[in-house]
Image (spheres, grey):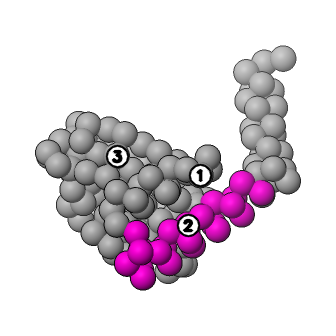
Amino acid sequence: MNWKEHLDKAVAAVKEAATSDKAQEIASKARTTAASVVEKIKSGAVDAADAIVEANRDPSVLSVRFMSADLAVLSPGEGISISRPDASTLVVDDGNGNGLVINAAADPAYVAETIGTVARLSGNTFDLGPEDGINVIVTKF
């Protein structure tokens, strides 16, 4: 089997896993967790520290720690990416032109810029894109 066949086989396995019942269950739970956290934040029932703790309880949350930045992406949708365009910057992008630019080298780190449609739900929580509860980013700086 050559490298192309191995790659095709691996891609097929990933696609199958992504469409499995377990993956759908995890995605559903992530959306429910995100919606719950968003509602609590909007009502003022959760402060910054509690939001990151609650977000990290869900195993489907994508967590990233880089320099002074600590992020949790609740209910990550398709196309979400986190990149490092330079040595001290993180960019969280939803693949649809919405994102956060984070200065991770500052102490504390901070969101330097928002791009596209980004709703700031609280001091440390952002919702990327027009859908509510998808790609909710909780920051801990």
Q: Which mark is residue 58?
A: 1
Secondary structure of the residue carrying numbered label 2: helix
- Quarter of the image that includes the N terminus: top right
Specify few, some or many for label 1: CA neighbours under 10 Å numbering under 14, 14-19, or 20 or more: some
- Residue 118 seen in the figure: no
Secondary structure of the residue carrying numbered label 1: loop
Pick the front one: 123 or 62: 123
The residue sitting at 29% across, 45% down in the picture is 69
Q: Which mark is residue 70?
A: 3
| Callout 2 touching callout 1 (CB < 8 Å) | no
Which residue is situated farthest in the left direction here?
107
Q: Quadrant of residue 134?
A: bottom right
Identify the magenta region: 25-46
Look at label 1 and name its amino acid: Asp
Secondary structure of the residue carrying numbered label 3: strand
Residue occupied by mark 2: 34
Where in the figure is residue 20, as x and y percent of width and height?
84, 50
Q: Earlier in the sequence, mark 1 or mark 3?
A: 1
Look at label 3 and name its amino acid: Asp
Q: Earlier in the sequence, mark 3 or mark 2?
A: 2
Pick the front one: 50 or 117: 50
The residue sitting at 24% across, 65% down in the picture is 113
